[in-house]
Image (cartoon, rainbow, N blue to C red):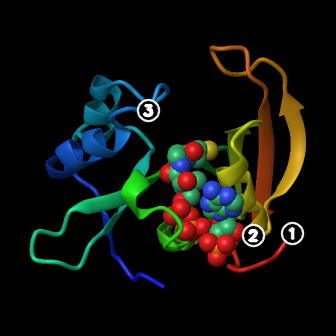
Amino acid sequence: MFVPEINFLTLNDLPGILRINAGLSWSWPEEVIKSDLGQDSGTETTYIGAFATTPEAPLLGYAVLGREKRSGVLMALLVDKHFHRKGIGSQLLLAVSDCAEYLNMRRLMLRVRKSNIAAIALYSSMKFKSEKIRQGYYSNGEDAIVMSAKLPLVQGVRP
Ligand SMILES: CC(C)(COP(=O)(O)OP(=O)(O)OC[C@H]1O[C@@H](n2cnc3c(N)ncnc32)[C@H](O)[C@@H]1OP(=O)(O)O)[C@@H](O)C(=O)NCCC(=O)NCCS
């Protein structure tokens, strides 16, 4: 398995984030990400990145942890499309789990498009269970599956 370096992201990582988002039809606007990463934004989001361990250390993927009451919310998880299926998404989820536990969160929840087979397979492999369907949740009318898991997350569970 490929072992990236995991780190918190700052405004300096904005170009890497935008590079990973490029080509996706549904990523967040640059202004939102900038404001989240801004030092005085006061937002309750934590950006965690996976970097290659080469001297250039490009960002290979990132996850965003938010909060809803006492639960953590996985607000985004994206891996550079050239680096899929190398375990980077799983390792980012484990880092999110550590961070959420540190913040005294007990569960991690997320919403995923019903058609997103890759993400659903990843979440299922880490013990997330489907809780409910939010019909027409996304702007194109697609349903969201709400999934959640008890923390800490455990890797490698086959559905
Ligand atoms: C979903 C995503 C983050 C997965 O990242 P990844 O680094 O490729 O995932 P991993 O390599 O850690 O995969 C771990 C396991 O998840 C499952 N999985 C991941 N991608 C899969 C796919 N395309 N098809 C089937 N299962 C898949 C497998 O069980 C895999 O284990 P295996 O490779 O040993 O079989 C990545 O595909 C991505 O960035 N997609 C676009 C953005 C997105 O959809 N994000 C989720 C929004 S909710």
Tag 3 residue: 24
Seen as rendered, the residue at the extreme front is 82
Camera-side residue of 7 and 16: 16
Q: Is residue 23 left or right of residue 86?
A: left
The mark total stands at 3
Work out whether 137 lies above or below 35. above
Residue 15, image x and y in percent? 18, 43
Camera-side residue of 159 and 12: 159
Work out whether 43 lies above or below 66. above
At mark 1, the secondary structure is: loop
Residue at 48 percent of width and 85 percent of height: 1
Q: In this view, does 9 lie to the left or right of 123?
A: left
Query: Contact (CB < 8 A) between labels 2 and 1?
Result: yes
Tag 2 residue: 125
Tag 1 residue: 159
Q: Can residue 124 be seen in this view?
A: yes
Real-space Cα separation, disc 3 to disc 1, in angstroms? 28 Å
Q: Is residue 46 left or right of residue 5?
A: right
